[in-house]
Image (tube, rainbow, N blue to C red):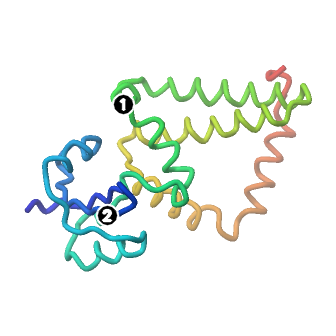
Amino acid sequence: MSADNFMAIIYEDGKYHGYHCCASLDYFNVEDYKRQGTYQFTEDTWQGAVDACYNFGYLEYGYDFINRPPDKQDILDLIWDTWLESHELIMNLPFDHYMVCVKEQLREAFLHYHQGKPDKAMNEVVDLISVSINWLVWFGQYKEDIRELVVNRVTSRMKDKTREIIEKYEQLRIDQDMSLWD
């Protein structure tokens, strides 16, 4: 058994199946791997699958739900699963690709908002979330890494500091010429 192991949980046929995996395998080929191996457990519930992982023993990288039933998916799961087919392409793009994406999404959101189309502006903001997640993937982050990054950032940078963050960026907005978005 490798020291860098994790439990891949796959939801299939209304059940949660746990496959013990080595993280040195290509993470994005877990679906293929699980077809070759046998699962360590099958559970009827989400919580049962989580409990089974903890009962399994030491897992250096814990567990990851490779797919989830629709009622258990969060936005990260939805975006991750949608873009997974383009993982290689995402990894081979240059850093500034993502800078261009962010700038363009912001520009489009600004224009839609000022054209009286808030629904379209909100769609662009959702696209910004998607771009941000793909950018984190480009940095080599997996779903659980991204979740951990978010928790760490919120607790170390944002918690109990929201007023000063808002004031900082509001002052930047006042000082900058926003006409460049027109």
Determine whether, in the image, residue 99 is placed left or right of residue 67.
Answer: right
Depth order, front residue of 113/81: 81
Residue drawn at (37%, 75%) of the image: 48
Residue 174 higher or lower than 153, as above or below: above
Residue at x-position 52% and y-position 46%: 78
Helix, strand or loop status at disc 1: helix
Instruction: Answer with left or right where residue 181 lies relative to residue 102.
Output: right
Q: For residue 105, what is the image quadrant?
A: top right
Q: Position of residue 119 (x, y in %)?
A: 81, 36
> Residue 169 versus residue 117: which sits nearer the camera?
117
- What percent of the width, then of the height, locates residue 123? 71, 35
**Foreground pick, 53 / 111:** 53
The residue type indicated by label 2 comes to Tyr
Left or right? Give the position of 12 relative to 158: left
What amino acid type should be assigned to the residue bearing mark 1? Met
The answer for how far apart the CA atoms under marks 1 and 2 are is 23 Å
Q: Which residue is mark 1?
A: 91
Image quadrant in which the C terminus is located: top right
Residue tagged 2: 63
In this view, the mark in front (1 or 2): 2
Residue 157, quarter of the rendered image: bottom right
Dot 1: within a 10 Å radius of its alpha carbon, few (fewer than 14), some, or many (20 or more) residues?
Answer: some
Specify which label sits upstream in the sequence, 1 or 2: 2
Give me the residue at 76% from left, 38% from top. Answer: 122
